[in-house]
Image (cartoon, helix red, strand yellow):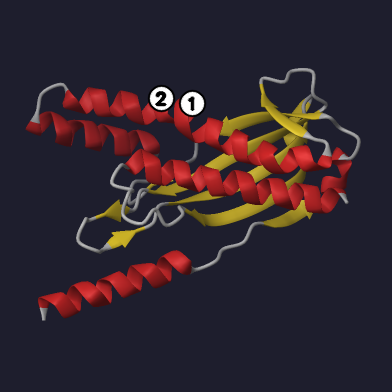
Amino acid sequence: MKKIGILLLTCFFLLAGSSVFSQKLKSGDLSLLKGQKVINLQYDYSKMKVGKYVSEEEYIADGTADRNKKKEGSGEEWAAKWRTDKGTRFQPKFETNLNGKLNKCGLEGKSNATDAQYTLILHVTALEQGFQSGIGVSKPAYIDLVIDIVDSKAPDKPLAIISYPKCQSVNMMGYDYDTGSRVMSCFDRAGDDIGKLICKNLK
């Protein structure tokens, strides 16, 4: 019975992981990027929910306390890594894959491209870490994204909005024990898909 239960759980999460949630243009017109060579990139995590937590800071505070109970100081180490992963792993992976697609239509995304006329703001509104049990049961990570294309001089007025709910991590064939690797995989996929969508609208 135990083996049957594990098999059923495995099938459930495989099916869940295979669900396709496509990105789509909710408003505006991406053709405004025609003729542009560079678009500025920004990232916003200010309203991000993490798992059951309504805010990232609540998640970090709880995770830090839990780890410190087991080993003093380990909570702070974990929290520091969680924060730095954004700039050292997630965002670089997104940019690499985004540009792998954008370069095909003559566009390039760059962080801190202050001279760019337009800015792409990647709002991460929710993050689910997923898990890998090591016994054939796993759950993919996912991120919920809202992407604003704005005039760099008027960042509060989106000219186009892309919605991308539940952008899931790819199947790593069991090599996704590290939470950061699973989340980075979501940014990997997001870069590809958003780059494709933009180029499609520039044709």
- Extreme residue toward the right, this view: 35
Can residue 45 be seen at all in this image of the molecule?
no
User: What type is the residue that disc 1 sits on?
Assistant: Gly
Q: Nearer the viewer, residue 72 or 102?
A: 102
* Label 2 element class: helix
Horizontal side, residue 109 vs residue 34: left or right: left
| Residue 135 against residue 109 in the figure, above or below | below
Residue 84 is tagged as 2
Q: Quadrant of residue 56?
A: top left
Horizontal side, residue 45 vs residue 197: left or right: left
Q: Position of residue 136 (x, y in %)?
A: 24, 64
Q: Position of residue 84 (x, y in %)?
A: 40, 25
Residue 87 is tagged as 1
Residue ID at (46%, 26%): 88
Q: Mark 2 and 1 residues: CB-CB less than 8 Å, in contact?
A: yes
Horizontal side, residue 55 vs residue 30: left or right: left
* Label 1 element class: helix
Residue 196 is tagged as none
User: What type is the residue that disc 2 sits on?
Assistant: Thr
Between the residue at mark 2 and the residue at mark 1, the CA separation in whole angstroms equals 6 Å
Residue ID at (83%, 52%): 201
Horizontal side, residue 113 vs residue 32: left or right: left
Residue ID at (41%, 68%): 16
| Residue 153 against residue 146 in the figure, above or below | above
Callout 1: 10 Å neighbours few (<14), some, many (20+)?
Answer: few
Residue ID at (58%, 47%): 190
